[in-house]
Image (tube, rainbow, N blue to C red):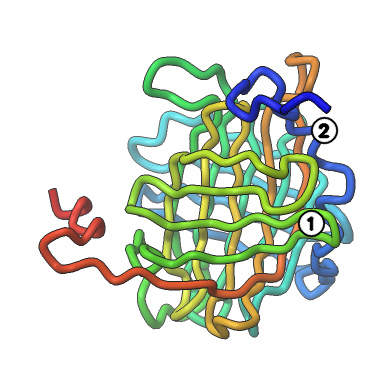
Amino acid sequence: MSEINLSDTSTWLPLDGLAPGFDASKAETTADLDGRTVTVVDDRGTRISHTFSPGTVAWDYRPGTGDATEAAAETDDCEVFRVDEDLYYAQFHHEHLPEEAVTLILDLRSGHALAVISLLGTAAAGRTAVQHVFVPSRIEGVEGSGEAPAPTTELIGRRVLWVYSAEHAYEHLYLSPHWYTWQCLAGPEQGLADTDENSVWRIRPGIYVFAWREKVIPCGSVTIADHRDLKALRSYGVLFGTDEAGTGQTHFTFGAHGRLLSNTVHPAEFDPARALER
């Protein structure tokens, strides 16, 4: 039996090769927002209304001051998940702009929202194929309360096991504000590991948006993860990237159950979280 060369990245699975069965732990979608219009407004005054119907969202984009994006209105297929009481995650892939996908986090209790725009391009030196743009905003008509979504270092040092299906399991080690390491423990990528870019935003106490951008496979992911019970973590997310042919896009949602394996506490003088202060 020949030994597998795990360092030969040319043999790594394309994103659509990973998809079968990866969504086994995906949560059920919710109809809570069906028939409702939710409008978010960001600091530029850009105003986006979202009208939810079963399986779709009709959105209307009106740019504010300094926003060079053109006004547009379309309807896209959409999945909505309930993460917590009055906290929802909506995921849609633009039909008219197939290189763009949207993750929308709506906190109807606090009045805060966070959109993460996934942009699929071509990898280059110092640039992954997928880039993420984070846009916090306010929900119109909801009196604001609590802290707005913001970048956080609260996950740094945690080592977490994530189980996506009976066949797919990975561990994540959150290293710094910019990097995390993943290792496949079970599944078609078993034995593979890498260190990739990440971004983490705090949504509510113990609930985070965790996004990563891979450099080997042209893909990126956005998840919202509930870390409040360290023995029973839950995540909801999307993978978005280039298909195996390299001519189209792969976009699919998934979910995972997890648990904290360990936590590293660095001495203050070597704390990776200080990178945000530099």
Q: Nearer the viewer, residue 74 or 236?
A: 236
Q: Nearer the viewer, mark 2 or mark 1?
A: 2
- The answer to whether residue 75 is visible is no
Relative image position of residue 183 (x, y in whole percent): 59, 48
Residue 252 pos. (x, y %)? 78, 44
Q: Disc 1 marks which amino acid?
A: Glu
Q: Residue at x 82, y 71 (%)?
A: 30
Residue 139 position within the rendered picture, expressed as x and y whole percent measured from the top left: 51, 67
Residue under numbered circle 1: 79
Q: What numbered label is drawn on residue 185? A: none
**Residue 53: percent from the left, percent from the top?**
84, 60
Who's the residue at 83% across and 28% down the image? 1
Observer-nearest of 51 and 159: 159
Disc count in the image? 2
Upstream in sequence: badge 2 or badge 1: 2
Q: Residues within 10 Å of mark 2 (few under 14, many from 20)?
A: few
Residue 1 left/right relative to 154: right
Name the side, left or right, on which 54 lies relative to 209. Answer: right
From what the image shows, is residue 90 above or below residue 8?
below
Q: In the image, is residue 196 above or below residue 166?
A: above
* Displayed quadrant of residue 102: top right
- Residue at mark 2: 17
Q: Name the amino acid, label 2.
A: Gly
Q: Secondary structure at mark 1?
A: strand
